[in-house]
Image (tube, rainbow, N blue to C red):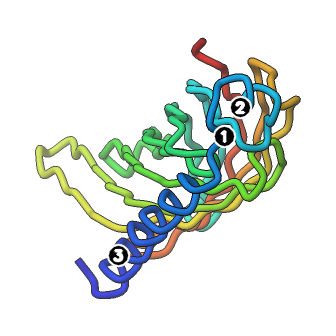
């Protein structure tokens, strides 16, 4: 793993730890206080579908993810994408992600974050390859704070042997 990827991962994990300690100090003491103060209430678990394109490689993708609350402002978002490759490429490409997303206002539009990316290529000839890297992302989520459905658009940079820029859109659906 490159030193810059290791430094990025260390920064993200320190930010999570420091933020969770700070959030614990301001957490409402009762469920009724949490219900009336929606800005501090943790988010919902959501299942998301995504589609988009890798603009650098001109490839389209589809995928899915889970949106798991990790605090009042943080969400852990594991997911995967399948890239539509041309026939002459002779391999299938999958990307698996584990991103941490920060929303400065839980009921707001803007979010940003980053995380780990694993690129897996399944070749027709049996020579599979795996590449490890990182993601940086920024996006907007549209929908009412308590709505079971939310639309989103997202820009994502993936840093591996090459750097890829993708534009994604999709739908998040509440699981409960």
Q: Which residue is mark 1?
A: 28
Residue 92 percent coordinates (x, y) = 34, 42
In front of the other: label 1 or label 3? Answer: 1
Residue at the spot 30% in from the left edge and 46% down from the top edge: 91
Report the front residue among 79 and 123.
79
Residue 39 position in % (x across, y down)? 79, 43
Question: Residue at left 48%, top 61%?
Answer: 21
Percent of width and height locating residue 100: 50, 54
Instruction: Identify the residue position indicated by label 3 in the image.
Output: 10
Task: Choose the circle earlier in sequence order: 1 or 2.
Answer: 1
Pick the quarter of the image with the C terminus: top right
Horizontal side of 97 relative to 153 (left or right) equals: left
Q: Identify the residue under disc 2.
A: 34
Dot 1 and dot 2 residues touching (CB under 8 Å): yes
C-alpha span from label 1 to label 2:
6 Å
Q: Are marks 2 and 3 in contact (CB under 8 Å)?
A: no
Question: Residue at left 74%, top 45%?
Answer: 106
In front here: 36 or 112?
36
Q: Is residue 63 visible?
A: no
On the question of residue 25 being in view, the answer is: yes
Q: Nearer the viewer, residue 29 or 129?
A: 29
Looking at the image, the residue that sits furthest to the top is 176
- Extreme residue in the front direction: 29
Q: Is residue 61 above or below residue 163?
A: above
Callout 3 crowding tier (Cα within 10 Å): few <14, some 14–19, many ≥20:
few
């Amino acid at each position: 793993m490159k030193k810059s990827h290791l430094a990025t991962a260390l920064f993200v994990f320190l930010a999570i730890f420091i933020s969770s300690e700070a959030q614990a100090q301001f957490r409402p003491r009762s469920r009724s206080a949490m219900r009336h103060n929606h800005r501090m209430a943790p988010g919902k678990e959501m299942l998301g579908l995504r589609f988009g394109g890798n603009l650098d490689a001109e490839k389209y993708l589809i995928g899915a993810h889970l949106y798991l609350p990790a605090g009042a402002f943080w969400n852990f978002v594991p997911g995967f994408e399948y890239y539509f490759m041309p026939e002459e490429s002779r391999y299938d490409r999958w990307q698996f992600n584990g991103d941490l997303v920060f929303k400065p206002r839980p009921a707001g539009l803007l979010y940003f974050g980053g995380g780990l990316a694993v690129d897996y290529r399944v070749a027709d000839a049996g020579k599979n390859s795996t590449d490890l890297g990182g993601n940086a992302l920024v996006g907007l989520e549209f929908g009412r704070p308590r709505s079971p459905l939310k639309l989103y658009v997202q820009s994502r940079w993936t840093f591996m042997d090459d750097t890829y820029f993708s534009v994604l859109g999709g739908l998040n659906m509440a699981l409960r």
